[in-house]
Image (spheres, coloured by chain):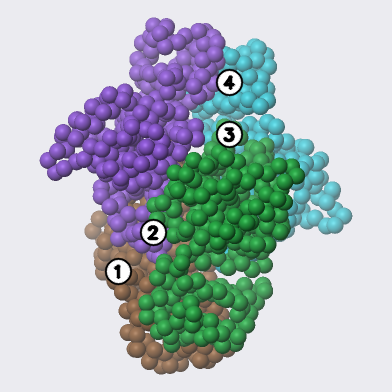
Chain colours: A cyan, B green, C purple, D brown
Amino acid sequence: MRKTARLLIACPDARGIVAAVASFIADNGGNLLDADQHTDKDHGEFFMRAAIEREGFGLGPETFAAAWEPVARRFGMAWSVFWGLPVKRMGILVGRQSHCLTDLLWRHKSGELDVEIPLIVSNHADLGDLAADAGIAFEVCPVGPDTKPQQEKRVLGLLSDARVDFVVLARYMQILSSEFVSHYPMRIINIHHSFLPAFAGGSPYKQAYDRGVKMIGATSHYVTDDLDAGPIIAQDTVTTSHRDTVDDLIRKGRDLERIVLARAVHLHVDDKILVSQNKTVVFD
Amino acid sequence: MRKTARLLIACPDARGIVAAVASFIADNGGNLLDADQHTDKDHGEFFMRAAIEREGFGLGPETFAAAWEPVARRFGMAWSVFWGLPVKRMGILVGRQSHCLTDLLWRHKSGELDVEIPLIVSNHADLGDLAADAGIAFEVCPVGPDTKPQQEKRVLGLLSDARVDFVVLARYMQILSSEFVSHYPMRIINIHHSFLPAFAGGSPYKQAYDRGVKMIGATSHYVTDDLDAGPIIAQDTVTTSHRDTVDDLIRKGRDLERIVLARAVHLHVDDKILVSQNKTVVFD
Amino acid sequence: MRKTARLLIACPDARGIVAAVASFIADNGGNLLDADQHTDKDHGEFFMRAAIEREGFGLGPETFAAAWEPVARRFGMAWSVFWGLPVKRMGILVGRQSHCLTDLLWRHKSGELDVEIPLIVSNHADLGDLAADAGIAFEVCPVGPDTKPQQEKRVLGLLSDARVDFVVLARYMQILSSEFVSHYPMRIINIHHSFLPAFAGGSPYKQAYDRGVKMIGATSHYVTDDLDAGPIIAQDTVTTSHRDTVDDLIRKGRDLERIVLARAVHLHVDDKILVSQNKTVVFD
Amino acid sequence: MRKTARLLIACPDARGIVAAVASFIADNGGNLLDADQHTDKDHGEFFMRAAIEREGFGLGPETFAAAWEPVARRFGMAWSVFWGLPVKRMGILVGRQSHCLTDLLWRHKSGELDVEIPLIVSNHADLGDLAADAGIAFEVCPVGPDTKPQQEKRVLGLLSDARVDFVVLARYMQILSSEFVSHYPMRIINIHHSFLPAFAGGSPYKQAYDRGVKMIGATSHYVTDDLDAGPIIAQDTVTTSHRDTVDDLIRKGRDLERIVLARAVHLHVDDKILVSQNKTVVFD
């Protein structure tokens, strides 16, 4: 992936966009490795992701914008380009539960997840050992009844000092304020332990148990001001039965959560997600 | 299945229930083909389903109750027994959509679904040909703004005349009154085209589309007074993406609905469902 | 779909292909609704599917080839274009089992499957009523120990007379000769009732039962000379347990087969499949 | 689980077995928490698993066999009883790949997997750090072209010294000899990275890629003399596409492997598996 530049585009739908983009890349010596597009007909919006081989491509981080600007202007594009290097810096917020953090750290260590992880923050000390084993800085920022604003401020400061590009809530059980979220728009990924919009809010496994559902789910989404209502990135479900206690649902759910969270993190890292109208366009 | 009697039991949890039931069956020359049990620890309730080979079993429809009563009394059991013959009589209510009805009729014709289908009722005439091809009586009972009570009365009369044991709503788009439901408690099976409790009520595919979920679901449940809130029997989900329009969701959902509905009907026909506290115990 | 032309391309990988294709379409007033591409790096092959809105597109069935030829020549393309109208003509071969045929006929009748079905052929008379209900010609061509060549000849004649574009084997239990297959290369779709390559050949459910697998599958594929070894189009699986008899597997499998077959037929009808090196590229 | 005794029974099918077992338990003051049964009609064999609450049960490890023997003799039962304490001792054999080991260690540390892990053995040194972090003994036993018998002997010695009850092959890439397997009959659990019987043997992901399948799978099974042909415990599959390279399949497969392996280990630890005729009866 590191040898690939990725160009993300959103603009009003029009004829000739793909031709213009593909020609621009070809004219600059680039090889178009992959191109995905989507038209949202409800809103007349066009979305595109182009993966360009960097070898042979005549443009780079310094020169791309100026060359590209005429094309972007012609179609009224919102766009971003990612060069793959340096890799993204991922901050992790956790509570007391280890399964999502263990999973992310293993994926990182094994080379599957191509990011830097400069920092893990928690409101509890429990998972410090995991961070230490992985050689990653771990900061405890406890939250008291009256200290939430200060705590968020401190967490934001730590994330900023660590030059974090995006934040993963790996079962962080605190609700983030609008102020906090505004620092990382569509760059905070949460895992909610239900099939949203079913069982939003607290204790979703208990809610699922009480309702007697025959499947449980997990949902990863970008965090917005609306609790558990941000754009959904990935979901999955698993079968349950009347024999499953709440503890069984929690145990089954853990396997689901870490896989659904990892899928969302991968998609974000590979710049495969565009957001529009509180929905994601996922080019996987 | 026809050669098998099925005994369903619910009672307060206690020691020795299985021993008492199994001994009773053995003492009467019965072969216990299958025995499933479940204890709801939250409410101290015990559930059991016993399948007894009829060949060699010394008891039958006329003699069972008297012999069994002492055991039932000892443990305070609510119980029912099903002898497999005559087969259950299934009434079907439909609207305009054919997929669930086509599916049920095919399963019936192929011998997979061991029921009699004496009657199909609809508020529209559209699916009359399907019923005619299958040689099943089809009655149209239209619903107008002010004629709902009369229509329900007429439908109830038709179901009663046809000596229907249970009712399947194969995409019948009318809400049934409490009065109607009370005639078939835990004997009306509905298919709701969402993963309940998400997207209860109308237009669930539109709701799912608007929310941008990455999976859609279908739920079969017993109908109670509470709309889409009765005990869930079966659920399933299928993957979707940003490319799916509402029409695509409807199309994908059709395949899900008919399979989830058929699963619920099979379980009901085979007496594999017990209901307690608005949840099902499904012995599959 | 009918208002959309679809262009399928296979050629040696090179720079500038997408630019050339997209520019060609734009230069001729076409709107590129959808474009999918894939590069097989093992063999240096490039594949593309472009969906072009016909409204406004300056080229049509008569004029496209001449205009397009220079582009095709430049990149050494193998290509085909489908105009959506007239719709494809689908012939169906069946044996005695009704589930796949019932399913295809329902999808056709409901408008989901945009094809003409001029002919159903079987080596048994059993399913004639289904064809009659659907108003489709039904021909019985029995196969005896020595009459296979003649029977195939007759079937080929019927398919040819009915101007069939492609053939669906909806549980047709006869092995087709190379000669037969050669008339419809990559245009005969089979459903095999196992997760290929496991349990190729006869009685796959019995094989699965004997092996004690915990899931069964179904596989749709194009038919080639090699029995059950043609390019796979779609597969799916479902959970089983030690309680499932061979008959249970057959019953569960039927639900799987018809859905996997329908998925393959849809993909073929929408020109979403390219074949290379005995594998499919599926642009879904 | 620790407060529960589990009784596993296999015997020729007969009337009255459940009554005899349940009465025996009740007569000795035991509470039958769960009872599962299965009859293999092909071979006339009956299987049962009974979970008995230890509190109040008048029998224990020293006294059970003598009291039970008459019942067992009456029905010709093969049986075993597990008292939950001390917990089972699980030995792990690994190669170079970390995902299954990481997963098992996390499940152990989190309390989900109720076993002792006295020993991890590998033919490579790579995963020693993981073992060290978990505080578990790690032994390297390299295999050379001529040293396989000696190496197996040494591994057997280590497992024996560690008083291991069963062995998990967490991606151990060596084929075990019949001699080795005979020391742990139906007590060695392997994870094979394909949907067996498809792609048995080496490089299953490469085989799957070459065949162009649309799903890959993973299979956990008991190890027997026949390579990849032992009784299957659990299987699962995941969707793939033409875009997936062999490396993608390997990456997707890792998530599948660890979940399928964990499921099998859980079932074994909870004494929920009986084996007969090279198939498993799984009481889950």
Give the Cα distance between marks 3 and 1.
Answer: 47 Å
Label 1: chain? D
Give the Cα distance between marks 2 and 1.
Answer: 14 Å
Give the Cα distance between marks 4 and 2.
Answer: 60 Å
Label 2: chain? C
Q: Which residue is mark 4?
A: A60
Residues at marks 1 and 4 on the same chain:
no
Viewer-nearest of labels 4 and 3? 3
Q: Which residue is mark 3?
A: B247
Name which residue lies at 53% across and 81% down.
B65
Viewport quadrant of the N terminus of chain D: bottom right
Secondary structure type for disc 4: loop
**Residue type at tag 4:** Gly
Viewer-nearest of labels 4 and 2? 2
Q: Residues within 10 Å of mark 2 (few under 14, many from 20)?
A: some
Q: Which residue is mark 1?
A: D42
Q: Is residue C213 left or right of residue B36?
A: left
Question: Residue C40: horizontal and vertical position, in percent?
Answer: 39, 29
Q: Is residue A174 left or right of residue A55?
A: right
Q: Which residue is mark 2?
A: C248
Label 3: chain? B
Residues at marks 3 and 2 on the same chain:
no
Secondary structure type for disc 2: helix
Residues at marks 4 and 2 on the same chain:
no
Give the Cα distance between marks 1 and 4.
Answer: 70 Å
Secondary structure type for disc 3: helix
